[in-house]
Image (cartoon, helix red, strand yellow):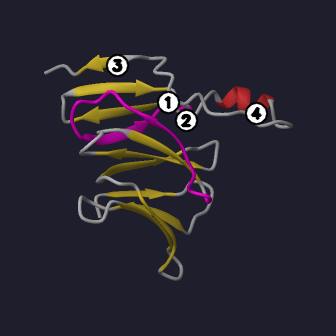
Amino acid sequence: VKALAWCPFQSNLLATGGGTADRCIKFWNTHTGAVLSSIDTGSQVCSLQWSRHEREILSSHGYSKNQLCLWKYPSLVKMGELTGHQGRVLAMATSPDGSSVVSAGADETLRFWRVFGDPAAKDADKAGTVSSTLGQPALGGLRCIR
């Protein structure tokens, strides 16, 4: 297991990410120990972040694409991919408002992504569906300070 993330909307749901040999994101019921679902991502899972506003989870990966993938839960449909890192995506953190994620790569860069969209817009549009602003690197990419 290379990555762990508690679900913010279901207290007994834990997501785990496997390494190079496993490549799977697994969803566990922590009360029973049962695997609820699993998906082979095709590459090493390095980090996981749940959306605070949608039933979505973001995964970061290593070889060969060094990408981030957004998955709908529980269908596990891939909503999209974010690319830009030249090395394995080692870690991610979500912004305080839950709309953006910063990723840290082995290429010594930080990249900022507005992945989960504007929570205020989602609250304003409760009657309809608001899609994520996936792929809009609205904050751009920054090189790390060494």
Q: Which residue is mark 2?
A: 98
Q: Could you tell me how far apart the alpha carbons at marks 2 and 3 are, in whole angstroms?
A: 18 Å
Label 1 sits on a secondary structure element that is loop
Comparing labels 2 and 3, the label whose residue is closer to the camera: 3
Counting residues from the start of the chain, the first of labels 2 and 4 encountered is 2
Image quadrant occupied by the C terminus: top left
Label 2 sits on a secondary structure element that is loop
* Pointer 1 with pointer 3, Cβ within 8 A: no
Q: Could you tell me how far apart the alpha carbons at marks 2 and 4 are, in whole angstroms?
A: 13 Å
* Pointer 2 with pointer 4, Cβ within 8 A: no
The residue stretch that appears in magenta = 74-97
| In-image side of 146 versus 94 (left or right) | left
Q: Which residue is mark 1?
A: 100
Q: Could you tell me how far apart the alpha carbons at marks 1 and 2 are, in whole angstroms?
A: 6 Å
Q: Picture quarter containing residue 144? A: top left
How many neighbours does mark 1 have within 10 angstroms: few (below 14), some (14-19), or many (20 or more)? many
Q: Could you tell me how far apart the alpha carbons at marks 1 and 4 are, in whole angstroms?
A: 16 Å
Q: Which residue is mark 3?
A: 141
How many neighbours does mark 2 have within 10 angstroms: few (below 14), some (14-19), or many (20 or more)? some
Counting residues from the start of the chain, the first of labels 2 and 3 encountered is 2
| In-image side of 142 versus 121 (left or right) | left
Q: Could you tell me how far apart the alpha carbons at marks 3 and 4 are, in whole angstroms?
A: 28 Å
**In the rendered image of this protein, does residue 26 appear above or below residue 103?**
below
Q: Picture quarter containing residue 51? A: top right
Residue visible at 26% across and 60% down in the picture: 19
Label 3 sits on a secondary structure element that is strand
